[in-house]
């Protein structure tokens, strides 16, 4: 079954982190991504650009509105994702616990509803 691991973190804190911390986190993600590949569970993954680059589309009363930025007032922002294919939720949760982002933010695990 496919699961999406949604990685949430404090975007401002990451932007203010010392360069060595950023370098270490990048290395940890590279190691984690390779482990997913080696286990043959990785389907896809990407980082997302900063929330300041986001555009929100809403349709209200038949009219489409295009607005700059996200509007969720949260401490953590969606920074990236992995899509993995594992036998069950327990295996997906085990992979989520190993994600470097779990150390500084949170990982939301959601089953993919195939279309």
Image (cartoon, rainbow, N blue to C red):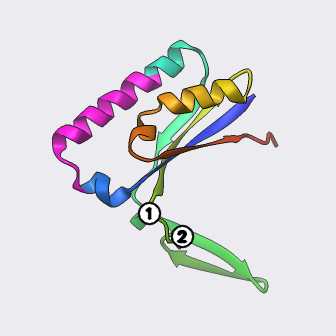
In magenta, the rendered stretch is 16-33
**Residue sitting at x 22%, y 50%:** 17
Q: Which of 75 and 32 is in front in this view?
A: 75
Q: In the image, which disc is placed on residue 57?
A: none
Q: In which quarter of the image is residue 115?
A: top right
Task: Tell me the SS state at disc 1.
Answer: loop
Tell me residue 15's x, y (percent): 27, 55
Q: Is residue 93 left or right of residue 14?
A: right
For label 1, the crowd category at 10 Å Cα-Cα, with few meaning under 14, some 14 to 19 and many 20 or more, is: few
**Residue sitting at x 50%, y 71%:** 73
Tell me residue 63's x, y (percent): 72, 84
Quadrant occupied by the N terminus: top right
72 in the magenta segment: no
Task: Tell me the SS state at disc 2.
Answer: loop
Tell me residue 78's x, y (percent): 50, 54
Residue marked by disc 1: 75
| Distance between the alpha carbons at the discs numbered 1 and 2 | 9 Å
Tell me residue 60's x, y (percent): 73, 83
Q: Quadrant of residue 86?
A: top right
28 in the magenta segment: yes
Q: In the image, which disc is placed on residue 72?
A: 2
């Amino acid at each position: 079954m496919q699961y999406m691991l949604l990685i949430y973190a404090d975007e401002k804190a990451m932007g203010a982190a010392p360069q060595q911390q950023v370098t270490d986190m990048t290395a940890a993600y590279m190691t984690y991504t390779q482990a997913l590949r080696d286990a043959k569970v990785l389907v896809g993954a990407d980082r997302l650009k900063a929330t300041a680059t986001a555009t929100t589309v809403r349709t209200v009363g038949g009219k489409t509105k295009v607005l700059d930025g996200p509007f969720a007032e949260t401490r953590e922002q969606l920074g990236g994702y992995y899509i993995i294919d594992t036998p069950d939720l327990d295996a997906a949760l085990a992979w989520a616990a190993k994600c470097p982002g779990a150390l500084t933010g949170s990982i939301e695990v959601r089953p993919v509803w195939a279309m």
